Image (cartoon, rainbow, N blue to C red):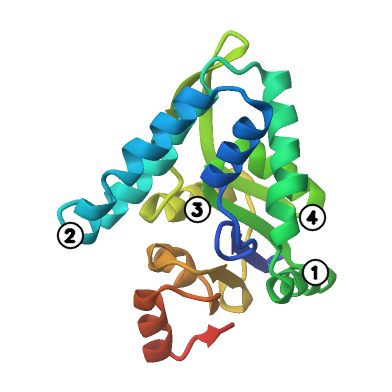
């Protein structure tokens, strides 16, 4: 009979690190002078919708999901071995140098205390696997890129790991692993109001430099804020 485990769930962008994947990919390609047109098109096309989002003409969740979904187009035609090179560079030269020390200290303490640690993000699964390996995180859950033969197609395998889908993916993952979890003593960390389902999933939600809406919720509920 499996004993109950305690988990600590960490969001990536804005929570564990202060950098963001799309900007890291852009910096990589500009540095290498590769894939510049698709990268520029992705940035310009999405920034052009920014005023419409700010005016409330585009739902926030739809706008955010489009960034993740369409970012996969920048990976179109990339072979698996090349993808590993790109994601290793992003991990070591762009993302991990911006680790938030106070949150990283929490991660290390949870590991020391025997918690199962989970990294969850809308970012690409293959990238999260590398980050999780670097930080000794037990599991990673993210958005999967579609491959055709040995190259990325430029599409994702739905769903985007965002909002309610994050919660569904965590539940599905825990069921697949046949893990019995003590949710009351478990922790979850995020900076975004869209991660409310993940935060409310555990007994100890912690908000990290939260957005305005999440800050309001956290204050009303008496959640820890760091």
Disc 1 marks which residue? 108
Q: Decide: marks 2, 4 in contact (CB < 8 A)?
A: no
Tell me how far mark 3 sits from mark 2, CA to CA.
32 Å
Q: Residue at x 42, y 51 (%)?
A: 162
Tell me how far mark 1 sits from mark 4, CA to CA.
9 Å
Q: Residue 122 placed where, x, y %?
A: 49, 47
Q: Residue 35 placed where, x, y %?
A: 55, 22
User: Is 9 placed above or below 23 here?
Assistant: below
Q: Residue 179 placed where, x, y %?
A: 64, 55
User: Is 39 placed above or below 115 here?
Assistant: above
Q: Quadrant of the N terminus?
A: bottom right
Q: Secondary structure at mark 3?
A: helix
Q: Residue 131 placed where, x, y %?
A: 72, 47
Lateral position of residue 139 relative to residue 59, left or right: right
Q: Give the number of the mark in front: 3 or 4.
A: 4
Q: Secondary structure at mark 1?
A: helix
Q: Residue at x 46, y 25 (%)?
A: 38
Q: Secondary structure at mark 4?
A: helix
Toward which corner of the image does residue 4 lie, by quadrant? bottom right
Tell me how far mark 1 sits from mark 3, CA to CA.
24 Å
Lateral position of residue 24 relative to residue 60, left or right: right
Dot placed on the residue nearer the N-terminal end, 1 or 4: 1
Q: Quadrant of the C terminus?
A: bottom right
Res. 72 in view:
yes
- How many residues crowd around disc 1 within 10 Å: few (fewer than 14), some, or many (20 or more)? some
Foreground of the two, 34 or 97: 34
User: Is 203 placed above or below 41 here?
Assistant: below
Q: Which mark is residue 56?
A: 2
Q: Give the number of the mark in front: 3 or 2.
A: 2
Tell me how far mark 3 sits from mark 4, CA to CA.
23 Å
Disc 3 marks which residue? 171
Disc 4 marks which residue? 135
């Amino acid at each position: 009979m499996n004993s109950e485990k305690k988990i600590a769930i960490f969001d990536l962008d804005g929570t564990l690190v202060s950098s963001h994947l799309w900007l890291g990919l852009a910096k990589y390609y500009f540095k290498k002078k590769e894939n510049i047109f698709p990268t520029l098109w992705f940035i310009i096309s999405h920034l052009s919708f920014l005023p419409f989002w700010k005016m409330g003409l585009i739902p926030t969740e739809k706008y955010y999901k489009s960034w993740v979904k369409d970012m996969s187009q920048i990976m179109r035609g990339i072979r698996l071995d090349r993808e590993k090179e790109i994601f290793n560079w992003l991990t070591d030269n762009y993302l991990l140098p911006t680790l938030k020390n106070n949150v990283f200290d929490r991660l290390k303490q949870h590991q020391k205390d025997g918690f199962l640690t989970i990294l969850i993000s809308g970012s690409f699964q293959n990238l999260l696997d590398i980050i999780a390996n670097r930080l000794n995180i037990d599991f990673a859950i993210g958005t999967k890129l579609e491959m055709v033969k040995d190259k990325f197609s430029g599409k994702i395998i739905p769903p985007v790991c965002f909002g309610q889908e994050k919660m569904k993916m965590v539940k599905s993952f825990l069921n697949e692993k046949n893990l019995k979890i003590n949710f009351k003593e478990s922790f979850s960390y995020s900076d975004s109001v869209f991660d409310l389902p993940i935060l409310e999933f555990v007994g100890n939600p912690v908000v990290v430099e939260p957005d305005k809406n999440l800050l309001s919720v956290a204050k009303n509920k008496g959640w820890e804020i760091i």
